[in-house]
Every structure is written in C-alpha cells, then in structure tokens.
Amino acid sequence: MQIPSKYEASQVESKWYNYWMEHNYFHSEPDEREPYTIVIPPPNVTGVLHMGHMLNNTIQDVLIRRARLQGKNACWVPGTDHASIATEAKVVAKLKEQGIDKNDLSRDEFLKHAWDWTHEYGGVILEQLKKLGCSCDWERTKFTMDDNMSEAVIKVFVDLFNKGLIYRGYRMVNWDPEAKTTLSDEEVIYEEKQGNLYYLNYKIEGSDDVLTIATTRPETIFGDTAICINPTDERFLHLKGKKAVVPICGRVIPIIEDEYVDLEFGTGCLKVTPAHDENDKVLGDKHDLEVVDIFNDDATLNSYGLHYEGQDRFVVRKAIAKELEEAGVLVKTETHINKVGTSERTKAVIEPRLSDQWFLKMEELVKPAIEAVLGDNNDIQLFPKKFENTYRHWMENIRDWNISRQLLWGQQIPAYYYGDGKADFVVAETAEEALILAQEKTGNSDLKAEDLTQETDALDTWFSSWLWPMSVFDGIRNPENEDIKYYYPTNDLVTGPDILFFWVARMIIAGYEYKGEKPFNNVYLTGLVRDKQRRKMSKSLGNSPDALKLIEEYSADGVRVGLLLSSAAGNDLLFDEALCQQGKGFGNKIWNAYRLIDGWEIDETIPQPESSKIALEWYESKFQKALVDIEDHFSKYRLSDALMTIYKLIMDDFSGWLLEIVKPAYQKPVDAKTYKALIAAFEDNLKVLHPFMPFLTEDIWHYIAERTPEEALIVAKWPAAKSINDALIAEFDFASEVVSGIRNIRKEKNIAFKDAIGFSVINKENTKSTFDSIIQKLGNLEAIEYVNEAVDGALTFRVKSNEYFVPMAGSIDVEAEIKKLTEELNYTEGFLKSVQKKLSNERFVSNAPDQVVASEKKKEADALAKIETLKASLASLN
C-alpha cells in the first residue's frame, strides 16, 4: 500500500483509536501473564483537560503501552472523583441560575440535581483523554460515588469506628465560608498577604486608664472575652486582677495572665477571642473563658455584631475601623505582613471555627506507611527521592484527620442519632442495622426506624479516594476476589507532588490497614507545568493553552513529545509551544523517512554492497546501545531522557547516517537483503517510539505490511536485547568525522558531489578499513589510498593523529589558497599565545574553577592540532 505524501493527524488519530477500541486492546482480565497495573489519579468529575492532566496522563500512557509491548498484562484503570466541594458549588450555581435556592431543597432533591449534572458533564475529561491517545481500560471506569464504591467507603468508616479510631469531637476547625463546610488542615493553603495592624484602646473598668492592644482583625472585638498579659511584663503589673471594657459592645471582660503572650509583639497585650482563633481557644479552655461566636456560616456577622449584623467580615473590617477611629479608640494603623489561610478549592479566606466534627485518629495508622517509604526495606520508592523529606515531615507531624464535611454531595456519614441531641448515636452500614444496634444499646425494643436520624454531614472526598487502588478492584467489599488478588499491589503511581499527602500517603495508610501491604511499588511525582516565565499555568493568568486546540494544531503525538521533551524527571515543566512544533516536525521526519524507503525499487538479484552490510551491522549495535540507555532511563522514570535517546537515534543515526549510506543511486534499485534488514531496523525504531507517539507509529506499521489485528503494533513485541559491538560503534564515530572533513572541503571549495575526488591517508592511528566503503560512498571518492608521507598540492585535515589529503591540482587558485591558509595560521598562532599566557599564570590556574581551566587546556590542544594541519596544508601547496 502506497504511503500518502502527507501525514494527516486528525484522520489518523480517530481511525487508530477506534481500531484499538474495536479490538479491545486496552481491556485486561487476570491470566497467566505478569500483571502491570496503574490506577489513574481520578480527575474531578467537574474537570476539563488542562496541561497538568496532559503531562500526567501522557506519562501513564507511555508506561502502560511499553508494558503491553513487553508482553505484560497491562491494566490502566480510569475514573473520576466526585469532588464534593467543587461539584456542589457547580450544582448550586446552576440551581441559582434557575432561581432555585439549595436550602429550599431536601437532600434527595438536591442529590437528584447533582446526579443530573454529573451525568451531563461528568464524562467530559475522560473523553478528552481519548484524544490524547490514553489507552485506559474503559470497561473498568470507576466513579467514587458509584454504589459499590460508596458501599466500600461506608464499610471502612464503620470498621474504623468499631476499632475506636473514629470519634466525634467539638474542635476548632478550618471553615470555608463560601462552600460552608469544614476543611482538613491539608486543604488550607497559607499565603503571605499584606494587611493592617490596628492599635485599639480598651478602657479599664472603674477608671480613666486605658490599655492598648494590636489586632489584625478589629471586626472580632465582638467575640472578645478576655485581655491577656504576660505575668512577667512589668509594664502591666498595675492591671493584674482588673477588668477591661470592649469598645462598641461595652462587654466587661477580665484581664488574665499567661506566659503565652509574646512581650515583643504588638503592645504586649493580647485580646482573647476563643471562638475565632485556635491559640485563643487553648487560652480560653485554660482560663475557663466564655466562648462568643460572632459569625454566621457564610462569615457574615450574627446578632453579636450589633448594628453590623448580616454584613460580610471584610466589609465590617473597614467600617468598624472607621467607627473606632471616630470614637477615638483607634490609636494608629500599621501595614503588616501575615500568613492567611485560604481554601484550596474555593480560594475563600478560612475562618477558624468551633464545630462538632468527625475525626480519624492517625497516630497508629500512620506507622506502617512511614516504614514503607522511609524504612530500610524501601518497599515503596518515591521518584525523585528528594520528596522523601517532604513525606517524612508530614507523616511524623500528622494530626487527626477531620473527615466530615457540611455538604450534601458525597457519602453520608453512617451515624444514626436516637436521643434528643447528638450525644446518643450508633454507627452502622445500613439504617436497618442501625435500628437493631440502637434497640440493643437503649434496651428499648419498641424503638422504630423513624426514631432515628442520620447524620447530615458527608465524608471528605479524600476518604473515598484513599481507598482507590483497592476499591477499583472491589477489594474492600470482596477482599478475596480474583481481580484484587491479581492486580494488587499496583505497579506505578504517577501524580503531582501537591497531593503527596492528600492522596498518596493516605492510600499507603489505607493499603496497610486493609490489605496488609503496599498499594503500589513506585510513585513518580511529576513537576508542575509552568510557562517560560516560570509562572504556574492558570486560567486567571491566561497563560494556559487550550489542550484540545494544541492537539488539533500539532497532533496528539506532537503534543505528547513536546510535553515530555520539556519535562526533566521530577522538575517543573517549562512548557513552550515550540516543543510541540518540534514534536510534530519529528513525526514528519519519520513519515518522510519511510516514504523514502517505500519509494525504492527492490531487486532480488543484485548483491548487497559492502557499505550497506557494515552500516546495518553498525546500526544494530547502535540501536542495542540505545536500548540499554532507554531501559536505564525508564528504570529511573527519566522519560524525557528515554525519549531524547530515541529522538537522537532516529534523527541522527537512522535518518542522518544509515539512510544516506544504504540509499541506492538515483533511479537505481536497492538490493533485497539491505531492504529487508532496513525495514527490520525501522520496525524496531517504531516499537521503542510507539509508547511516546502511538498514532503515527501504528499508522506507518500498517503501511509497511498488511497486518492482522494480532500483529498490530500496540501488541507487538518489544525489541530483544542483543550483543553490542562497541568497537564497531567507535570505528564508525571515527569514520563519521572523516566524512565530515571531506564534506567540509567540498563545501569550502564548492566541489559538486557528483565529481569524484582523490583521497589519501597517513594512518598513524592504525584504524581498520572496516568503514572505507562507507567513507568512499559518502565522500564520492575515486578510491582510498594509504600513504606514508604528505601528498603535494592537496588540502588536508586531521582526525586525531591521522592525516587525510584531498589532491586539488588544477582545481584551485593556489596563490589565493596559500594566502587564506597563512592568514588562518597567523590568527590561530595568536589565539594560542593568548591561551598559553593565561595557562602560564599560576594565579589564574590556582583560583579558576576546574572546568574553566579544563576548557582553556582544550582550547590549547585544539589550536595546536589546527596549526599542525594548516602547516601541513601549506607545505603541500608550496
């Protein structure tokens, strides 16, 4: 079948993806082969493909396609995460557009809207991954809110509660006033922001004295229940045992003493607001202070805020500063930098808030996970290893996990209350089981289902996804099923370092708790995708390209290559669209290389030229050497380096040298033996390139020969390792320098390639004649003559100590050539003197870095060799 002149990516990509799907190449079932398993980091069901997804999933697809070629039973499980906060926000926004208030809906009514939204938009990102070429086992697609997945989550909650590891507690938590839910500590991002430090005067009860406090949040004065001083602070000895009056609200509060107060910060007096600061809460508990919560769940002020009731906290901050100033209470204002916690999901500023929440004890659970990564056995490897320190810091300073969320979208916590308040409850997988437990606990067999009320909070989304490597194979509900026994533990996890604790560490914890072993062998942590200015890509900055438009313009293969060429292992990716163009150009080069071969006429009768025979032997060794390097790069997750090795192999060695050597003369046929060996070499190239550029390689593979579905490239066999002739590679490297020398002379003297030229060698290096036939063909030499002395009237060049002569009698202006060479000799001798002067300076040699000195010595050696060559050329012309 004749290959078209142009590669049409848009037609080819859909054609081959449909072909792969039609023949079920992506699907895996347990069998006798070695399994190779990856579970996808489930993107948010609300998501669309962005550059981070593109990088992460390209890497996973490269790994899974390579495993498939290696004959392993490759299984890549896709799926999405229900993303409770983000999805609920999307649904609430859509309802608002329809004039519906979430608060007017029952839980079931809201969930119906949420499921409708999910069914309409939830599959978008998975469909987009197909455009990238991702070879996921789509039959195994999971969603964290699927019935069987939710059942596993509830089962784990009940089990952990029964083990005494889950408890309900009234604690200071991180409150997201936009999502109106609590967040775990890990979901809060602290950013340095410039604000103000407000200095306020509080009157001392029963006197005209005042004390000054400094606060960044004047709106919280309505929640003040004490002023605290350091008992060692001599400035405030006269205040001990007295009381102060809170401005505006007039509340009389005690002045307490505690060494917690920093004598150096602010004024040395601290206002204590136990309901709105974690440290203040500790002081409040210690000194038995009243707790006054001044905020509604949306961070507007409640009735404690008096005339500010119903107003947003930041609006109140400005207004109350003005009121305090007018009242003579605000003494001064200073700019102040402090760390402000923001919600990882909504970006809202977090409010510390006292609340009843559900917590998971982590102190004992975390121990096997620490040992797995940081212990002597290194059961789980992190790549790059630098992230072990981050992992250690998080895991050794872990706090109990706040697992409850004040949301409707998510798994509803299986706690059932049967008393008047929330003190009396049971935990069970179903309402029926809960009723039995409640009857047993109360001794009241007349208790009915309607007497029980289920907890309204949902579980944190991460409480679903921490089970992902097990739950996708139904390993929680059916721990002995065939899938979990075959595919678990999985092989590689590819994800971003930003969720090393959120997700990776928690999966390890869950794996040891519920399977008694690690969930995966290796974790490859990719860098973040940044623009050329090192800025993180984001919609707000407008620096994140449209992923699908990139594929449309540069092809999926081109984008995959562009991403990986700019992605050094574990480092941030500095994305440049020009690299996608380079990837597209690489594809075109391969396409045209095959078009060239495909256009040759094959003759079964002509013998194989010696030049072709030795070139093919050389390329086989060169390929095998590259294969060793590729395997080494894969073992270290240096996929960019693996791709670059393949890129250079095909661009330089195959296209740049091999094709030139074996190419038949114009309108002449190629011998069948050479053609067959060349196609075999080209097919090996396609095999190692296929994981990176699946569409182009599969397309060319089928142009090379008619293939059955069993012979498709996607299920071909990875090239076998063979012996490497290092001597042959070294000889070729030498010969290639000789060819370059001949080509330079031809270019300088404008000698057309069709004109054969003479060639003589003084072989001081004792090089073999193995590549003479190739040198003769690529240089179009009349013959190669080995001589013992310089050839008169010839131009010369050197490769190491070998001298090469190209006789130029009658073809050049000898006088002009002598003049040119003399000028070049004088310049080079002057350059040599300057270098040697520098090297003779002991101060320079002693103080300069080793690489700088080495560079100067190389310049000296190069100049000496060049001078010798120029002198030889002049001698032959005189």
Image: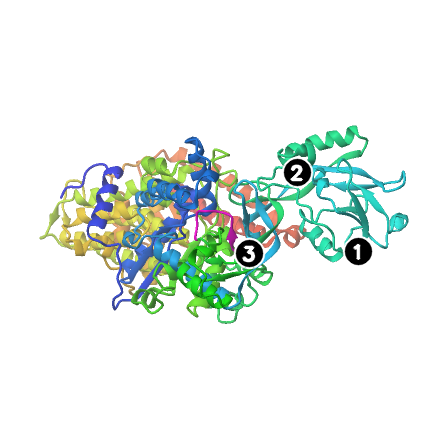
Badge number at residue 422: 3
- Label 3, label 2: how many angstroms apart (C-alpha)? 25 Å
Q: Give the range drawn in magenta.
A: 401-411
Going 74% across and 55% down the picture, which residue do you hit? 288
Q: Which of marks 3 and 1 is nearer the N terminus?
A: 1
What amino acid is at disc 3?
Lys
What amino acid is at disc 2?
Ser
Please tell me whether mark 3 sits on a helix, a strand or a loop.
loop
Residue under label 2: 303
Going 24% across and 46% down the picture, which residue do you hit? 17
In the depicted view, which residue is nearer to us: 330 or 207? 207
| Left or right: 161, with 560 as reference point | right
| 213 w.r.t. 456: above or below | above
Q: Which of marks 1 and 2 is nearer the N terminus?
A: 1
The image position of residue 728, as x and y in percent, is: 31, 60
Badge number at residue 790: none
Circles 1 and 2: CB atoms closer than 8 Å: no
Position of the C terminus, as image quadrant, is top left
| 831 w.r.t. 462: above or below | above
- Magenta region includes residue 776: no
Badge number at residue 259: 1
Dominant SS in magenta = loop
